[in-house]
Image (spheres, helix red, strand yellow):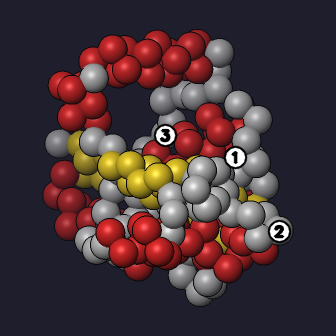
């Protein structure tokens, strides 16, 4: 599977869970964060900025592509995600758009990228499919109890440093979660 923004809080959890279940993980992160992502267990780490991500994923998978892409970046990265997913059976789960919006047309899905494209919003999941949300949370609590996942240690900023924290986040200079304290 391909996990974008693997050095972020959600990306780190995704790498840990994927490895726990035996997946081969290809992760993207900026070069100064590669060691963090490798330490989590990622099998391959790709530069999220300076490389043709789709081409590198296809090279690593002998042209097959990945079964699942966790897409939180959006923008131009969504195109790379669609191109990196395995034709017909590959899935791209979109749960963020930190890099901006991206347009996907029906032509793209019929003629260019024959993949399953899924939008995921936790609030909508809770409202529309509470039974699936309960199953997911039950599994998450098992992973917490087993020590696969933990609370993590966020980078802590004083509330007055909020603009600095946002600037560092926008500059992609952060690792993991951020917390503002009053």
Q: Which mark is residue 58?
A: none
- Measuring from the top left, give residue 20's x and y in whole percent: 71, 31
Check the image and report above or below for 171 versus 1.
below
For the residue labelled by badge 1, is the local secondary structure a helix, a strand or a loop? helix
Distance in Å between CA atoms under marks 2 and 1 = 24 Å
Q: Give the mark nearest the N terminus, 2 or 1.
A: 1
Identity of the residue drawn at 60% across and 67% down: 84
- Measuring from the top left, give residue 48's x and y in whole percent: 56, 74
For the residue labelled by badge 3, is the local secondary structure a helix, a strand or a loop? loop
Q: Which residue is mark 1?
A: 40
Distance in Å between CA atoms under marks 2 and 3 = 37 Å
Distance in Å between CA atoms under marks 3 and 1 = 14 Å
**Residue 29 is at least partly visible in this image:** no
Q: Which mark is residue 62?
A: 2
**Residue 103 is at least partly visible in this image:** yes
User: Is the Cβ of the residue at disc 3 closer than 8 Å to that at disc 1?
Assistant: no
Circle 2 or circle 1, nearest the eye:
2
Q: Nearer the viewer, residue 170 or 59?
A: 59
Is residue 180 toward the left or the right of residue 144 in the image? left
Q: Give the mark nearest the N terminus, 2 or 3.
A: 2
Q: Which residue is mark 3?
A: 153
């Amino acid at each position: 599977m391909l996990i974008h923004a693997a050095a972020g809080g959600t990306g780190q959890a995704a790498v840990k869970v994927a490895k726990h279940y035996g997946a081969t993980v290809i992760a993207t992160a900026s070069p100064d964060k590669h060691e963090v992502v490798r330490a989590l267990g990622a099998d391959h780490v790709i530069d999220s900025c300076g490389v043709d991500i789709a081409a590198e994923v296809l090279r690593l998978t002998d042209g097959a592509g990945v079964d699942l892409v966790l897409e939180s970046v959006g923008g131009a990265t969504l195109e790379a995600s669609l191109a990196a997913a395995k034709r017909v059976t590959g899935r791209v789960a979109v749960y963020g758009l930190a890099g901006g919006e991206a347009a996907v047309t029906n032509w793209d899905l019929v003629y260019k990228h024959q993949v399953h494209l899924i939008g995921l919003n936790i609030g909508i999941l809770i409202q529309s499919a509470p039974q699936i949300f309960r199953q997911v949370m039950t599994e998450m609590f098992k992973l917490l109890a087993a020590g696969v996942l933990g609370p993590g240690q966020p980078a802590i900023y004083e509330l007055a440093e909020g603009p600095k924290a946002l600037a560092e986040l926008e500059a992609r200079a952060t690792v993991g979660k951020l917390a503002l304290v009053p």
